[in-house]
Amino acid sequence: MKLLKYLFICSLLAVIAVACNKGLDPINPVDPGTDELSPEISITFPTEGKIVRSPDSVATVFFKFLASDDFELKSVVVNLDGTEIGNITSFKDYRRLDASFEYGELRNGEHTLTVTASDFTDKTASKTVNFLKITTEVYVPLDGEVMYFPFDGDYMDAIAAKELTIVGAPDFVNEGKINLAYQGATDSYLTIQTDDMITTHEFSASFWMKINAVPDRAGILTMSAEDLANPGYPNVQNLRTSGFRFFREASGTKQIIKDNVGFGTGECWNDGGLVDPSTGEWFHLAFTISETTSSIYINGELARESVLTAPIDWTGCNLLSIMSGAPRFTEWNHFSDLSLLDELHIFKRVLTPEEIQSFYAAKK
């Protein structure tokens, strides 16, 4: 009897084993192929020509770079000014390293960062960037100032230390009004959320521009509302009954600087004044919005005022676009501005004419 039970159990297990394996392909080794390509490297911080600022003469920084290989990374070596400061040989993903490499002894001066990646067939690739480290005092905002962008190699707000969101591929140039400057590019601009910035019915901005008249019109600073009644592109833009739109347009061989302000039940236009881009000069531009007036200043002088029927309405205005009307004001082709921009100060109050004149005179 026991023998029969034993034979039954063995037969049952054999049937189950056959059933479980039915339909499965046998496991066969797969040829991994050959390592044909060299590694690839990109450095995202610092970028070429960047100015790294710190209140300390010796600072801690995080060098950010990406290394990848078609087969397998063997090592990634980090060199600063010809001296090895890191050698990475262990990888969570053996084909890709997305690194934020901490270095605690970055001193003032010019530096060269080189990242070299090798694979197991000894193919290598290197990427090098040159940058400058300087000591700067902590920026103390002026009365009512909520944002300040010096554009000296980064897109950081010097007050809140918040990064702007980058759209497209803008750049920096070494010919700024002060140090570096923002360089516009086609389909490129910057944005930042403004939910915690708008607390009054007043607004001011002060900045420098070297204007490129091509294209013949562009958005410069815009804070428009999303049209919630018509969600989805393209109907999320061009709602002009709230927020503001500061922009430029061709007027003969010159450019006219304008703004548009929404006050809930309507809009106010201010046709500002003219500048001549052919001079190749930097122009100081400023505009203020009080509860009753929209004012535009060019090179420290009042160009034009327009009366507001009611105070500005901020409903739905939670996004500031810099150097484009996009994504919420592209009416009449007010897309990206290819000009240079520098020293952008933003306030939640009205600047006085004397303060605007001082901004112009200080950097003239």
Image (cartoon, helix red, strand yellow):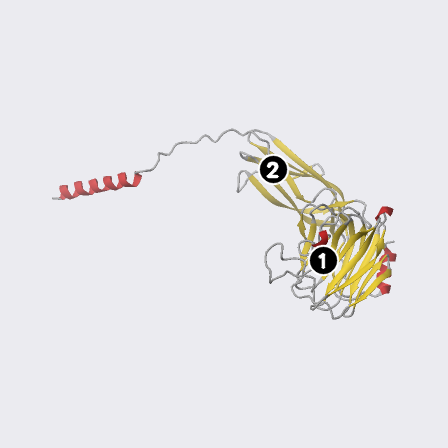
Q: Is residue 184 visible?
A: yes
Q: Is residue 55 visible?
A: no
Three-letter residue code for mark 2: Val
246 left or right of 9 in image: right
Three-letter residue code for mark 1: Thr
Q: Nearer the viewer, residue 279 or 88?
A: 279
Q: Nearer the viewer, residue 66 or 297?
A: 297
Q: Which residue is mark 1?
A: 222
Which percent across, then down, holds residue 302?
86, 62
**Farthest residue toward the left?**
1
Q: Depth-wise, is mark 2 or mark 1 nearer the camera?
A: 1
| Image quadrant assignment for residue 263 | bottom right
Residue for point 74% across, 56% down? 221
Disc 1 residue crowd, few under 14, some 14–19, many 20+, Cα 10 Å? many
Secondary-structure class at tag 1: strand
Q: Nearer the viewer, residue 72 or 37?
A: 37
Residue for point 73% across, 68% down? 201
Q: CA distance from mark 2 to mark 1?
A: 43 Å
Which percent across, then down, holds residue 309?
76, 70
N-terminal of the pair, mark 2 or mark 1, is: 2
Disc 2 residue crowd, few under 14, some 14–19, many 20+, Cα 10 Å? many
Which percent across, then down, holds residue 249?
78, 53
Instruction: Indicate whether 45 appears above or below 315.
Output: above
Secondary-structure class at tag 2: strand
Q: Which residue is mark 2?
A: 76
